[in-house]
Image (cartoon, rainbow, N blue to C red):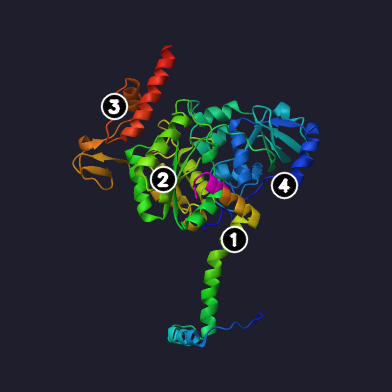
Amino acid sequence: MPDRVSIKIPRPLYNRLQRVIDGSGFSSATDFIVFVLRDLVGSLEPEASSSDLSPDELVAIRKKLENLGYL
Amino acid sequence: MIKAHGGRLVDRFASATERTQWLDQADTLPVVTMNRRETSDLEMIATGAMSPLEGFMGREDYEHVCAHGRFPGGLPWTIPITLAVDSANADDLEIGSPVALKGPDGTLHGVLELAEIYRPDKEREALQVLRTTDDAHPGVAYLRSSGDTYLGGRITLLERPHHARFESSRLDPRETRVLFKAKGWDSVAAFQTRNPIHRAHEYLQKCALELVDALLIHPIMGETKSDDIPAEVRLECYQTLLRNYYPTARVAMSILPAAMRYAGPREAVFHALVRKNYGCTHFIVGRDHAGVGGYYGTYDAHTIFQEFEALEIGITPLFFDHAFYCHSCQNMASQKTCPHDKEQHVFLSGTKIRDMLARGEELPAEFTRPEVAEILRRHYQESTADTIA
């Protein structure tokens, strides 16, 4: 099993998650949270890796787009 | 944001340090002078528009792409991107050594890490990629006019080609990606064109815009045929149309610095992959996309996409039938949506349009917006006057 860390979430949210996963096939709230986070992070990762822009480059591009009237 | 083709957006710009180092030794390097298409390809490779390509193709990539429309690893890629020289020039080059790449005007634009020198079978290339060996096909004519030896290897861009025109309308893939993100556009349909936009094109674009967040009008402004409408005139048409008839908050226009190959269906897939690199999620494919003369079937550019899995291509093609204004429907329609006879349809061939404009006649408002018609009429009358003078 890979290393794990503990992340604290509000108790009421945890209770709601328990109700959501009831009968869903997820064996625990943890499994459900890991599934959702993997999906979310997966959808964000390509954006970061495909552009590979430094903060300075990003600012310069945004400035150019503003100057040209695109933004 | 959609991934670049192959998973990573290529960046082959030299860093400041690399640039200085290359410029210091540039005079000692053997030189290859590129033509306009190759210079444009160099820029497209460097900006990532041709990701995953990092240079001009070596023999294995070239032959696989020509034969199968894919890289040897299976990734779809339908157009060979090559650098041609005469065999006599190739004799002066040494594999493993850098080569200075200069443009037609002698400007040093980049460096090639020469990995391969090979003789292509251009007849086979023409048949496989262009589906013809007819000299009258502009792509075949290009192959016959270029060198008999190809050079392969990774490139580094030192100096971008100077664009005296349309500087404010040129965005690189990184820039369009930042633009789309800043605008909050998750889905963007790209429209490729090398002609003025008439009502039929506008109809396709707006149908697409009903499905996605935004539209990128992405005209090719690289090398085109001599009888295509000049780029300045086309740009004026696009700007006028956008100003008067498009929701500017959901539409952007930028220039694609690519050269046309006129490879019909093969080029349709290529155009889609390039737009994917610009961050577009959808690509409009109309009738006879990138075609010329009668070399390709009207919908060959649609059916070729069946040769690939949707996930392999990544970007979603939006196929459209022939569109027109129908007097009976009293709106724009296509063969797919209109039940009426051809007599009810307003459609003008390119030849007919040119003849009407040259005579100073009005184009019907059902065919083209009056503002666009006026720009074209002015252009043709000035051209005719120049010819007579």
The answer to whether mark 4 and mark 2 are in CB contact below 8 A is no
What is the CA distance from the residue labelled 3 to the residue labelled 4? 53 Å
The answer to which of B307 and B316 lies nearer the viewer is: B316
Q: Nearer the viewer, mark 4 or mark 2?
A: 4
Callout 3 crowding tier (Cα within 10 Å): few <14, some 14–19, many ≥20:
some
Quadrant position of residue B149: top right
Label 2 residue SS = strand
Residue B353, horizontal then vertical, whole percent: 33, 27
Identity of the residue drawn at 55% across and 29% down: B142
Q: Nearer the viewer, mark 1 or mark 2?
A: 1
- The answer to whether B169 appears left or right of B23 in the picture is left
Query: Residues in magenta?
Result: A64-71
Residue ID for mark 1: A48
The answer to whether mark 1 and mark 3 are in CB contact below 8 A is no
The answer to whether mark 3 and mark 4 are in CB contact below 8 A is no
Identity of the residue drawn at 21% across and 45% down: B339
Residue ID for mark 3: B362
Identify the subunit bearing mark 4: B
Identify the subunit bearing mark 2: B
Residue ID for mark 4: B15
The answer to which of B27 and B248 lies nearer the viewer is: B248
Report the quarter where the C terminus of chain B lies. top left
Label 4 is placed on what type of residue? Ser
What is the CA distance from the residue labelled 1 to the residue labelled 3? 51 Å
Residue B388, horizontal then vertical, whole percent: 41, 12
